[in-house]
Amino acid sequence: MKRIFAAGLMGVALIGGSAAQADPSFGVGLTYTFGGDWGVGVRMFHDDEPESAVLAIGADYKFGSQAFRPTVGAAYLDEDFYLDFSLGYDTRIQALDYGVGLGTAFETEPKP
């Protein structure tokens, strides 16, 4: 499982490298992890253009398992909110899990 997560991180790094001209944006929000756990997290998006699909990397703190959860995923970014689907690694139970998040987005700017 750790190899799958490492391969996912490597893929995001390689894809993100090709979008080096884009300015990143950030977000803070809530995440529901399939299996019944809730968390609060931060996200960094590879682009700041609203109304677009973007790659996301971030971290959550899960309340139920009381663990940190580094994440990679995809998100829909709007001017002031985001909706994301993430693959994360629960550091306490040492397992991969999936989650859906919603939160506030910062530093988004429409392209001219």
Image (cartoon, rainbow, N blue to C red):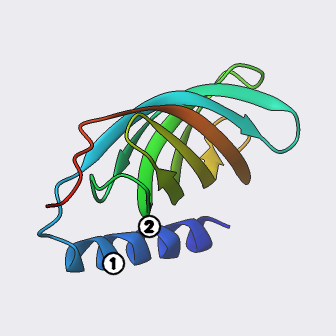
Q: Residue at x 58, y 50 (%)?
A: 84
Circle 1 Cα neighbour tier, 10 Å, few/some/many (<14 / 14–19 / ≥20): few
Q: Residue type at mark 2?
A: Leu
**Quadrant (top left, top right, bottom left, bottom right) of the N terminus:** bottom right
Circle 2 Cα neighbour tier, 10 Å, few/some/many (<14 / 14–19 / ≥20): some
| Count of picture labels | 2
Q: Residue furthest right?
A: 35
Q: Residue at x 80, y 30 (%)?
A: 37
**Quadrant (top left, top right, bottom left, bottom right) of the C terminus:** bottom left
- Secondary structure under tag 2 reads helix
Q: Is residue 48 left or right of residue 71?
A: left
In the rendered view, tell whether residue 33 sits above or below residue 40: below
Q: Quadrant of residue 27?
A: top left
In the rendered view, tell whether residue 80 sits above or below residue 75: above
In three-dimensional space, the C-alpha distance between marks 2 and 1, rounded to whole angstroms, equals: 10 Å
User: Which of disc 1 and disc 2 is earlier in sequence?
Assistant: 2
Q: Is residue 85 left or right of residue 65?
A: left
Q: Residue at x 60, y 36 (%)?
A: 102
Which labelled disc corresponds to residue 15?
A: 1
In the rendered view, tell whether residue 87 sits above or below residue 62: below
Which residue is label 2 attached to? 9
Which labelled disc corresponds to residue 45?
A: none
Q: Position of residue 97 (x, y in %)?
A: 73, 52
Q: Position of residue 74 (x, y in %)?
A: 53, 61
Q: Residue type at mark 1?
A: Ile
- Secondary structure under tag 1 reads helix
Q: Quadrant of residue 56?
A: bottom left
- Can residue 40 be seen here? yes
- Can residue 95 be seen here? no
Q: Position of residue 71 (x, y in %)?
A: 52, 50
Camera-nearest residue between 50 and 70:
50
